[in-house]
């Protein structure tokens, strides 16, 4: 029904294609809202400026993944200046100019000094000598749409096929690795449960999407495997630190059966490991329960002169520790729910794709990069991104007196929590956060941010989930598994049995830390502190008294937005 107004014959300055492409390309538009009379958009559109902080969430590829929205093939068969120009809005077909020019990259040898240095980026790319970057600043003049298919059709003779330039290698050029037929052994307790001192041994097959068996995990340098363990599933802490399967522990392959087996180094301990970058004495005695063995395999692709990408798969294997009791895997959120927006959720460079696995590292009291963390290579402090904000400098890290790496000198995000439950909520509500938890940041105070790999500053102040964040069941999905009968396994952690089906109850449990991820203001912080007893480890919260299921201010009640209907919040504070 959008076409009732957003067409070429109505009052809107936006035909539907301009509004849809413009909004979803938002943060990557280069000339948002500029008039393009050459293809029928004679008026500027200032409304598009309201969407330049919007990022399209499919992973990988974001808005390059045209098939996310286009159920048919029109995106690669029906070309027009309007359709292409509303994403590539800096291209003016009547003059053949790109304004501003598109920066396509820097030559592998370094900054360009002349046009021939940019030949590897294709025809028509020139050198912007002042910056050393290769740019595309021109396009053949097109007075109509008749010639578009000459260069952009999906054909071998096309100069710049839409299919080729919109290709997402992380979807199309991978083998589609899958870990299948997983089993675990090594438990010496009753019913196959594990005791302190046992070492779990996981067995699995590694296959491709076409059913082929991958036999060279041990010898192929592009393939890697990583193993870790945590638990219990109700409140995970690290149990076995992240280990590299090919160089730590024992990885074997049975070529006849096509089965790998991996035995990590060491044994299961009676106490947990400290949280990542947290207090080294912050450990606890491991209680009996369901624990998780998580391992993943990654195939890395690093084509010369092109962006790298990954193919990966991982599995969570539940085990019983210290008691023979029903297994309850963690089912607080669902990968399928995440993928309704993200298509193929990929994190940490594409090597992790299972959201439930995040809790293996992102545990209670885990922190982002600490003071002393080593980042990118450098020669002077001015080349360190954090130096301008007072938290990073170029230092000698290999004892040869020559500065070589950027090092964090002051915590840029004090007490920045990376527990997954806080992390996920805070990221998806970043644009509307109150800024209290990040008020002491050295860089962009008040913006939700973390310091990540290579000391990178990762700010999420413009992110806001495209759904209504108050509708918790968007992410906290039901498994729908049958339950209650004698033969049925119990519902997983985060689920409860209702009318013989497992439904999500995790979102109904008030947790101060999680609530503060969205309700990020001083009053809410004080409220949580006042109602928390810090005389125990972990601290004892009394949130259930007022906000637990059935209470006067339960999460279900205060987040009820449909009966009666509650208008949505402003997307910009």
Image (cartoon, rainbow, N blue to C red):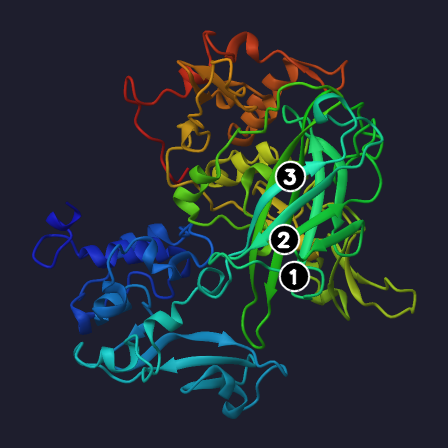
Q: Residue, x 30% and y 22% (percent of image)?
A: 562
Q: Residue, x 33% and y 68% (percent of image)?
A: 88
Q: Is mark 1 on a helix, strand or loop?
A: strand
Along the line of sight, the residue nearer the viewer: 202 or 106: 202
CB-based contact (under 8 Å), mark 1 and mark 2: yes
Mark 3 and mark 1 lie on one chain; the one further toward the N terminus is 3
The outermost residue toward the left is 9
Q: The N terminus is located in which quarter?
A: top left
Q: What element carries label 3?
A: strand
Q: Residue, x 39% and y 62% (percent of image)?
A: 64
Q: How far apart are marks 3 and 2 (CA)?
A: 16 Å
Q: Where is residue 343 in the image (x, y as percent from the top left)?
A: 42, 49
Along the line of sight, the residue nearer the viewer: 291 or 10: 291
Q: How many labels does the image show?
A: 3
Residue to which mark 2 is pinned: 297
Q: Nearer the viewer, mark 3 or mark 2?
A: 3
CB-based contact (under 8 Å), mark 3 and mark 2: no
Q: Position of residue 510 (x, y in %)?
A: 54, 19
Residue to which mark 3 is pinned: 183
Q: Distance between the residues labelled 1 and 2?
A: 7 Å
Q: From the viewer's perspective, is residue 481 above or below residue 475?
A: above
Residue to which mark 1 is pinned: 223
């Amino acid at each position: 029904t959008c076409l009732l107004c957003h067409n070429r014959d109505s009052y809107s300055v936006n035909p539907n294609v301009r509004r849809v492409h413009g909004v979803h390309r938002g943060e990557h538009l280069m000339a948002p809202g500029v008039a393009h009379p050459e293809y029928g958009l004679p008026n500027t559109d200032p409304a598009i400026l309201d969407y330049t902080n919007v990022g399209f969430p499919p992973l990988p590829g974001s808005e390059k993944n045209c098939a996310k929205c286009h159920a048919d093939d029109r995106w690669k068969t029906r070309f027009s200046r309007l359709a292409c120009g509303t994403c590539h809005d800096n291209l003016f077909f009547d003059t053949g100019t790109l304004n501003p020019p598109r920066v396509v990259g820097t030559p592998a040898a370094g900054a360009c000094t002349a046009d021939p240095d940019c030949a590897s980026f294709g025809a028509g790319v020139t050198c912007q000598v002042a910056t050393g970057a290769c740019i595309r600043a021109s396009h053949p003049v097109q007075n109509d749409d008749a010639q578009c298919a000459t260069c952009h059709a999906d054909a071998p003779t096309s100069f710049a096929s839409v299919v080729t330039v919109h290709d997402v290698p992380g979807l199309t050029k991978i083998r589609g690795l899958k870990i299948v037929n997983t089993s675990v052994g090594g438990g010496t307790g009753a019913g196959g449960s594990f005791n302190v001192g046992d070492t779990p041994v996981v067995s699995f097959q590694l296959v491709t999407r076409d059913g082929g068996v991958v036999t060279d995990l041990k010898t192929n340098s592009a393939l890697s495997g990583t193993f870790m363990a945590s638990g219990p599933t109700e409140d995970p802490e690290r149990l076995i630190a992240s280990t590299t399967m090919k160089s730590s522990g024992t990885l074997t392959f049975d070529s006849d059966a096509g089965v790998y087996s991996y035995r990590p180094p060491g044994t299961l301990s009676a106490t947990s490991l400290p949280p990542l970058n947290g207090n080294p004495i912050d450990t606890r005695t491991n209680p009996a329960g369901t624990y998780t063995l998580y391992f993943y395999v990654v195939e890395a692709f690093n084509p010369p002169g092109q962006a790298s990408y990954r193919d990966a798969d991982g599995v969570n294997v539940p085990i019983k520790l210290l008691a023979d009791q029903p297994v309850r895997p963690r089912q607080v959120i669902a990968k399928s729910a995440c993928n309704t927006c993200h298509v193929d959720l990929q994190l940490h460079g594409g090597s992790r794709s299972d959201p439930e696995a995040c809790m293996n590292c992102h545990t209670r009291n885990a922190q982002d990069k600490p003071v002393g963390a080593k980042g990118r290579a450098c020669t002077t402090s001015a080349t360190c991104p954090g130096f301008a904000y007072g938290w990073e400098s170029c230092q000698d890290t290999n004892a040869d007196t020559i500065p070589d790496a950027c090092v964090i000198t002051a915590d840029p995000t004090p007490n920045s929590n990376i527990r997954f439950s806080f992390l996920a909520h805070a990221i998806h509500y970043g644009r509307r956060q109150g800024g209290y938890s990040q008020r002491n940041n050295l860089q962009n105070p008040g913006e939700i941010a973390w310091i990540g790999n290579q000391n990178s500053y990762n700010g999420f102040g413009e992110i806001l989930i495209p759904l209504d964040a108050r509708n918790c069941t968007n992410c906290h999905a039901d498994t729908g598994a049958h339950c209650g009968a004698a033969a049925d396994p119990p519902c997983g952690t985060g689920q409860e049995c209702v009318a013989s089906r497992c439904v999500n109850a995790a979102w109904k449990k008030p947790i101060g830390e999680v609530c503060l991820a969205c309700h990020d203001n001083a009053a809410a912080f004080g409220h949580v502190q006042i109602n928390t007893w810090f005389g125990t480890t972990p601290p004892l919260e009394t949130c259930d008294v007022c906000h637990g299921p059935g209470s006067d201010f339960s999460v279900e009640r205060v987040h009820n937005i449909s009966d009666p209907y509650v208008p949505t919040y402003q997307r910009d504070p």
